[in-house]
Image (cartoon, rainbow, N blue to C red):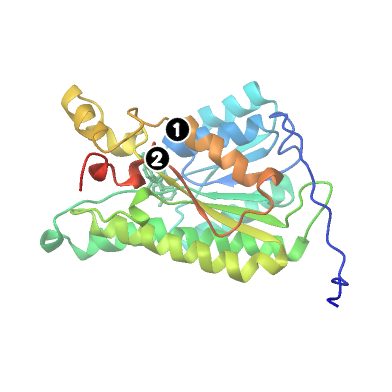
């Protein structure tokens, strides 16, 4: 006769669906949060009850706008902190500033990223390094500081079921090759395997690590893909759902993955792409 397991399983907690409290009391850091997806993610986390560090690389004024929007519209606390995510000392100083202001960290959204495009045989080493440094090494540096604090503090049951949550902003290009963007696609493929390895390594510490894979989202990074009628029509051939994504689409996914609603989810990429990864070219043949 088979024995029943002797260990006691923690109860599955059914968190509140109330957007105002789903992240109540949690402390979040969003990198590259002065524009585009990062800005909207920071605001959405604030709406869900978190205090937020708005990281920015250079644009202090727009970072401060995000801070004010969180404070005034969400009623939670926010501060802007300047740091280049690819610089180890600046990243460590940013986390120390966060700990002095908010005490700890519960949620890291590794969002900062950029493109430096060129045909492969014209791609400079400087372009290659810049994109890998910011998009991939930047996520490593920020995740490492967050994990050190998650492990030091452990789970605080009144705050969250998990000791910490990391959300890596990846891309559909972690699986879709992208000619002319080898540095960018490589950085996102690297994020995919970093995320999965961290999820495996850190799950016993109750640290969840996931990624979001945005498709085409209307932000400054890809203006040329949507700002003319011709470009938009061409883009739509790649999007079965026939609309461009908005930063809010990504922000909603980030709130979900950061919350205890996703407590049994780790090591996955949630594609938020209107079906772009469904091989739309095969919809009518192939
Ligand atoms: P964006 O240009 O508005 O945002 C990128 C942010 O990263 C900017 O605020 C920029 O200042 C910041 N940043 C750049 N270098 C930095 C550094 N060294 N240190 C700190 N911050 C730095 O573009 P976005 O579309 O909002 O991009 C956000 C993330 O989403 C990126 O990782 C991008 O690869 C990813 N993404 C975007 C799309 C899309 O369609 N917009 C699709 C897939 C993935």
From the image, state whether disc 1 or disc 2 is nearer to you: 2
The picture places residue 122, in percent across and down from the top left corner, at 11, 60
Q: Which residue is mark 2?
A: 273
- Image height check: is 155 above or below 58? below
Query: x and y percent of residue 258 in the render?
Result: 63, 46
Crowding at mark 2 (Cα within 10 Å: few <14, some 14-19, many 20+): many
Of 56 and 270, the residue lying toward us:
270
Q: Residue at x 21, y 43 (%)?
A: 285
Relative side of 244 to 38, left or right: left
* Element under disc 2: loop
Q: Which residue is mark 1?
A: 247
Instruction: Tell me which image quadrant ligand 1 sits in.
Output: top left
Q: Is mark 1 within 8 Å of ligand 1?
A: yes
Q: Position of residue 286 (x, y in %)?
A: 20, 48
- Vertical arrangement, residue 240 with respect to residue 177, above or below: above
Quarter of the image that includes the N terminus? bottom right
Tag on residue 101? Answer: none
- Would residue 266 appear left or right of 16 to someone viewing this image? left
Displayed quadrant of residue 231: top left
- The residue sitting at 30% across, 57% down in the picture is 185
């Amino acid at each position: 006769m088979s024995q029943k397991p002797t260990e006691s399983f923690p109860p599955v907690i059914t968190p509140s669906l109330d957007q105002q409290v789903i992240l109540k009391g949690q402390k979040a850091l969003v990198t590259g949060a002065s524009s585009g997806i990062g800005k909207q993610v920071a605001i959405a986390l604030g709406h869900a009850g978190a205090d937020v560090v708005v990281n920015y690389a250079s644009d202090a004024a727009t970072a401060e706008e995000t801070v004010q929007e969180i404070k005034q519209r969400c009623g939670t606390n926010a501060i802007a902190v300047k740091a280049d995510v690819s610089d180890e000392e600046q990243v460590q100083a940013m986390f120390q500033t966060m700990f002095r202001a908010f005490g700890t960290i519960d949620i890291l959204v590794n969002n900062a990223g950029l493109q430096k495009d060129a045909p492969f045989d014209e791609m400079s080493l400087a372009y290659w390094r810049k994109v890998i440094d910011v998009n991939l090494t930047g996520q490593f540096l920020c995740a490492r500081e967050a994990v050190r604090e998650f492990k030091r503090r452990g789970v605080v049951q009144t705050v969250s079921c998990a000791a910490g949550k990391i959300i890596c902003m990846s891309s559909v290009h972690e699986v879709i090759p992208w000619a002319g963007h080898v540095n960018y696609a490589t950085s996102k493929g690297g994020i995919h395997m970093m995320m999965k390895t961290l999820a495996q390594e850190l799950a016993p510490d109750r640290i969840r690590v996931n990624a979001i894979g945005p498709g085409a989202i209307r932000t400054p990074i890809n203006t040329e893909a949507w700002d003319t009628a011709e470009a938009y029509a061409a883009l739509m051939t790649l999007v079965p759902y026939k609309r461009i994504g908005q930063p809010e689409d990504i922000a909603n996914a980030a709130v979900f993955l950061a919350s205890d609603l996703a407590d049994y989810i780790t090591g996955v990429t949630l594609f938020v792409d209107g079906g772009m990864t469904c091989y739309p070219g095969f919809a009518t043949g192939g």
